[in-house]
Amino acid sequence: MFGIFRQWKRQKWIDQPLPDAWLAILQEKVPFFSEMKESQREPFLEQLKIFLGEKHFEGAQGFEITDEVRVVIAATAVRLTTYLDISRYDRLTEIVVYEGDYRHPHQDSALGGPSADGIVYGEAHRFGTVVLSWKAVVRGLRHEDDGQDTATHEFAHVLDIADGSFDGTPILDSMKDYQPWAEVMSKHFLALREGKRLESKVLDSYGATNEAEFFAVASEVFFEKPEKMKKLLPDVYERLQSFYGWDPALPVEEQPDPKSE
């Protein structure tokens, strides 16, 4: 019964017209939106409306949650699920947003610990909350080819834990996909941890922390430096392309069309 009600609510959100103000925000503040072709925009915008309808946004330390904050962060989340299903975010209930990068003691219940100087850009918690620095979100979008994007990193963690565990393996299409995923990701994770030159040229060393961080870091590079990853780590690129559905190393007009429901 709950599933039927959820589907009804989601269809109601989909059927509502996209506010002009939201479209303006996407066009002005979300660079990758203008690079999407029409067949990608329809599922993307449908998921955007569902995400904004279902998820609660909370400002930390008095930070004001505006439509710009909500739409931009939602856009970064649903880019990852455009070829998947918005239900991948069912465990996520709340996004807490700080105005800037912040500090606090690292908590074992979250992934995305502090940097060397104790500054935190974002976290994904087991209990359904993502915490983000708005400054880091904007920085990630502004520098869209540096291989670092905090929002992509944290929402990749949410996809990872959709099966109940932060282990670097999200829910894959079929059972036959798990063995090649494990073989490829484990090989390159161990190589990065050992400081191998090839992996270190593509992936940030933070990905060597554990398998979950490896997946999140690799996801950042997949979307931001796809040509480099495809050239130097083609098997990692292939696994991520198979999972996300995107093929970002291709020109826009050659991107695959999302599957129709």
Image (cartoon, rainbow, N blue to C red):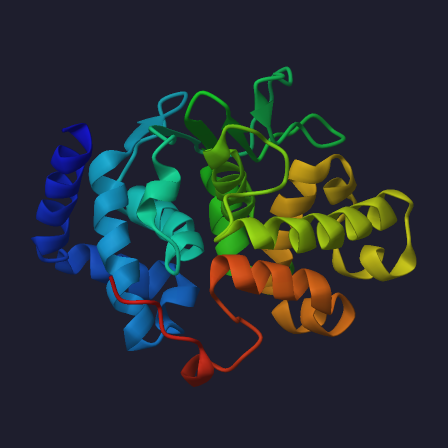
Q: Which part of the image, by quadrant, shows the N terminus?
A: top left
Quadrant of the rendered structure where residue 165 is? top right
Q: In percent of the image, x 81 and y 51: which residue is there?
A: 187
Nearer the observer, 49 or 91: 91
Quadrant of the rendered structure where residue 33 is? bottom left
Quadrant of the rendered structure where residue 257 is? bottom left
Label total for image:
0
Question: Is residue 184 shown left or right of residue 258?
Answer: right
Measuring from the top left, give residue 239's x and y in whole percent.
Answer: 62, 60
Measuring from the top left, give residue 56's x and y in whole percent.
Answer: 28, 30
Measuring from the top left, give residue 80's x and y in whole percent.
Answer: 44, 54
Q: In percent of the image, x 78 and y 69: which residue is there?
A: 232
Question: Is residue 117 shown left or right of residue 88?
Answer: right
Query: In the rendered image, is residue 144 in sight?
Result: no
Question: Is residue 38 shown left or right of residue 16?
Answer: right
* 57 in relation to 28, above or below: above
Q: Which part of the image, by quadrant, shows the C terminus?
A: bottom left
Q: In percent of the image, x 74 and y 55: which residue is there?
A: 184
Measuring from the top left, give residue 108's x and y in whole percent.
Answer: 63, 17
Q: In percent of the image, x 63 and y 40: which residue is there?
A: 168
Query: In the rendered image, is residue 8 in sight?
Result: yes
* 14 in relation to 249, above or below: above
* 124 in relation to 200, above or below: above
